Amino acid sequence: MGRGSRGPARRWREQYLARTFSTGRYVPYESLVAQAAKMRGLDPALARRLTQAYGQLRPWPEVPRVLAAIAATMPVGAVTNCSGELGHQAAGLVGVPFAVTVTAQSAGACKPRPEPYRRALDALALPAGRVLFVAGSPYDIPGAGRLGMDVWWHNRIGMPARPGPGLVAEHRSLDPLPAFVSGTGE
């Protein structure tokens, strides 16, 4: 199955995203992934196998290079709906130090509720208008945008848009991001 296909794994991910972004209060990531698997007719035990394999995940090929270029000039952070353990583990796999990593578990709420985004803004000591949120999911667009952040959507697999305030760009690759951040590109 190719990336971006509409196969079982993609449908499972879409179900997980819909479930997570509608949950509000923090619910353990592993529970949401298992519920999404079950709702898609998959074995809920796949969620446990996925979380056990988190250390084997690799970021998209351009991620370390792009984030290293940006982190050389400004702080970079991560906001994730993962548990604390998995969120920090995933952030560590990128190979670029994050100034802040906020998990839904630490914020007590899942995105798109404002708590995780606000916690990141507070940790960075920056107002929303000075932060570009790079979204990996269409559900982040209204969440980050409602707080006043510009949102650059990394729509790697061509998911349908969920329009919202703040969307300034959409790309399938992160390669254009450093030029955008520096003000020399779209």
Image: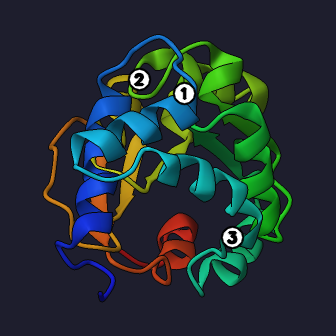
Give the mark nearest the N terminus, 1 or 2: 1
Q: Are marks 1 and 2 in contact (CB under 8 Å)?
A: yes
| Residues at circles 3 and 1 in contact by the CB criterion of under 8 Å | no
Q: CA distance from mark 3 to mark 2?
A: 23 Å
Where in the figure is residue 12, as x and y percent of width and height?
Answer: 30, 54
Residue that label 2 marks: 147
Helix, strand or loop status at disc 3? helix
Q: For the residue marked with disc 1, what is the amino acid?
A: Tyr
The foreground one among 17 and 41 is 41
**What percent of the width, then of the height, locates residue 95?**
83, 71
**Dot 1: what SS?**
helix
Residue at mark 3 to residue at mark 1: CA–CA distance: 19 Å
User: What mark, if any, has residue 67 been given in the picture?
Assistant: 3
Neighbourhood count class around disc 1 (C-alpha, 10 Å): few under 14, some 14–19, many 20 upward: many
| Amino acid, disc 3 | Leu
The circle on residue 117 is: 1
